[in-house]
Image (cartoon, helix red, strand yellow):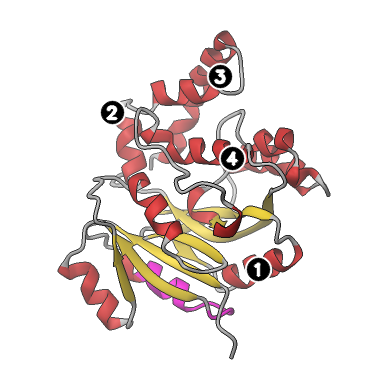
Amino acid sequence: MEKPIHTFVVLAYKESPYLENAIKSVLNQEYPSKVVIGTSTDNEYIRSYADKYNLEVVVNPIKNGNNIGDFDFAWSHGNNTIVTIAHQDDQYDPSFSRKVVEAYEKHPESVIFFTDYYEIRNNERVYSNKLLKIKRLLLLPLKIKGSATSRFWKQSALRWGTAICTPAVSFVPANVPFEKIFRQDEFIGVGDWWGWYKLSLVNNTAFTYIPEPLMGHRIDEATHTSREIRDGSRTKQERKMYEKFWPKPVAHLLNYFYKDAQKSNSL
């Protein structure tokens, strides 16, 4: 069989109880993707699953203390045509990588592909709620033929708040014109939102949306995102992101309403 053109980098941090489930889901794909584990917190727990499933571990020498700090390391170490950063707490449906590879064959000019997703709450799949409906509405323009390469329409997924679910994203490294996508400074809490904004500015590349819920994003009180929302550290950063798209008074108003939407990230 030909060498697969898609790699999952399972981003592992410390000792997640969901890590093995994530690994099993990316190994159980209809398309035989390559799978590696990426981490900045190398430990016996992570190594035990790497050994169990015979997976390579790539270790980020920079100890970031946060997931966003590992994102650039992960996508750039996938060493393949298409790379998906698989979050340790999440899971991927068997058709995920096949659908991504098929989309790449049709749209090789894409810088990222991203699928729709469902939430995992108390180990149950949730396919529809207020937040998911809003995100799907914001992504509708990207379903229109020719819109995926337009900066205006790419940013339609970002200007009201990011509608792109980070663990549903796959990268085409050859189409990324810089070494680092994500920020770890004052934008660290919204580093993914910043990253999609940065990629939206790249000319002649597409944001290709696959409008099928092909992966599950876990909503858990212990996740890094949930902790940031509880301590309020994201609010100022989100306001600065809105200012990338809107005048300051509008940005502040939007940020006020966006804080209410954050509640959906709690159980």
Give the distance between the C-alpha atoms of the residues marked 1 and 4, in whole angstroms: 20 Å
Q: Nearer the viewer, residue 229 or 146?
A: 146
Task: Find disc 2 in the rendering and name its residue.
Answer: 231
The residue positioned 27% from the left and 59% from the top of the image is 16
The residue positioned 49% from the left and 17% from the top of the image is 256
User: Could you tell me residue 267's position as x and y percent?
Assistant: 38, 43
Give the distance between the C-alpha atoms of the residues marked 1 and 3, in whole angstroms: 34 Å
Q: Is residue 78 visible?
A: yes
Give the distance between the C-alpha atoms of the residues marked 2 and 4, in whole angstroms: 22 Å
Residue 42 among those drawn in magenta: no
Secondary structure under the numbered disc 4 in the rendered image = loop
Q: Nearer the viewer, residue 181 or 214?
A: 181
Residue 22 among those drawn in magenta: yes
User: Could you tell me residue 75's position as x and y percent?
Assistant: 45, 57
Q: Of circles 2 and 1, which is in front?
A: 1
User: Could you tell me residue 118's position as x and y percent?
Assistant: 54, 54
Left or right relative to 254: residue 103: right
Secondary structure under the numbered disc 2 in the rendered image = helix
Numbered mark located on residue 190 in the image: none
Task: Find disc 4 in the rendering and name its residue.
Answer: 163
Crowd tier of the residue under label 4, counting other residues whose Cα lies within 10 Å: few below 14, some 14–19, many 20 or above = many
Residue range highlighted in magenta: 21-32
Crowd tier of the residue under label 2, counting other residues whose Cα lies within 10 Å: few below 14, some 14–19, many 20 or above = few
